[in-house]
C-alpha cells in the first residue's frame, strides 16, 4: 500500500485523515460502489498483520506516521548541524543550550511541527 510518506515524514496526521486513508484503501481493496458492496473477506486489522502472521502486510497509517516522525526526530538529534535542525532549534528551542532536550524534541515532533 502506498502511503503519502513525504507528508507523513514531517507532519502528524489527524485521526480523521488517517481514517480517511484507511477508508479509501479499504474501498480499493474490497471494491464495490454506492449501490452494491462486495464481500469483506477479512477484517482490516487482519490485513495489517505481517505476511508471516497470516496478514497481507498492509501498513497501519497511524503507526507509520509515528515511526516516520520518530525517525526524523532521531536524525535531527543525532545531526544537530543539519539545516533543518538549526531552523527548528532557532524557532522552537531558543532558550535551550547547544544540545537538544530529547523529551521536548520528541514532544515537538509528536505535535507534527518537524
Image: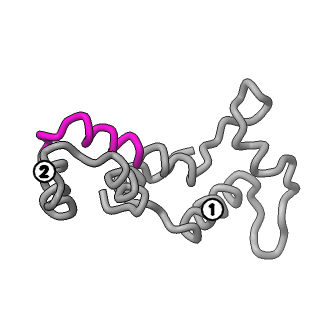
Residue 91: x and y, percent?
16, 64
Q: Nearer the viewer, mark 2 or mark 1?
A: 2
Q: Quadrant of residue 73?
A: top left
Left or right of 17 on screen, residue 86 = left
Disc assigned to residue 104? none
Residue 27: x and y, percent?
70, 60
The residue drawn where x is 64% and y is 56% is 25
Q: Mark 1 points at which residue?
A: 24
Q: Does the magenta stretch include residue 74?
A: yes
Disc assigned to residue 86? 2
Q: Does the magenta stretch include residue 107?
A: no
Residue located farthest toward the bottom when viewing the structure as drawn: 35
Dominant SS of magenta comes to helix
Residue 18 versus residue 101: which sits nearer the camera? 101
Residue 44: x and y, percent?
76, 51
Quarter of the figure with the C terminus: bottom left
Residue 41 versus residue 61: which sits nearer the camera? 61
How far apart are labels 2 and 1 at the CA level?
Answer: 37 Å
Dot 1 surroundings within 10 Å: few (below 14), some, or many (20 or more)?
few
Left or right of 14 on screen, residue 91 = left
The residue drawn where x is 70% and y is 43% is 48
The residue drawn where x is 48% and y is 63% is 13
Q: Is mark 1 on a helix, strand or loop?
A: helix
Magenta residues, start to end? 69-82
Residue 29: x and y, percent?
71, 51
The residue drawn where x is 33% and y is 44% is 72
Dot 2 surroundings within 10 Å: few (below 14), some, or many (20 or more)?
some
Left or right of 24 on screen, residue 76 = left
Amino acid at each position: 500500500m502506498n502511503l503519502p510518506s513525504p507528508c507523513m515524514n514531517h507532519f502528524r496526521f489527524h485521526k480523521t485523515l488517517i481514517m480517511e486513508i484507511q477508508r479509501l484503501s479499504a474501498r480499493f481493496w474490497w471494491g464495490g460502489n454506492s449501490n452494491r458492496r462486495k464481500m469483506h473477506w477479512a477484517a482490516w486489522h487482519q490485513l495489517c498483520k505481517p505476511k508471516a502472521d497470516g496478514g497481507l502486510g498492509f501498513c497501519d497509517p497511524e503507526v507509520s506516521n509515528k515511526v516516520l516522525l520518530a525517525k526524523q526526530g532521531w536524525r535531527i538529534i543525532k545531526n544537530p548541524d543539519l539545516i533543518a535542525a538549526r531552523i527548528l532549534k532557532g524557532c522552537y528551542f531558543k532558550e535551550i543550550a547547544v544540545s537538544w532536550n530529547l523529551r521536548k524534541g520528541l514532544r515537538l515532533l509528536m505535535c507534527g511541527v518537524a
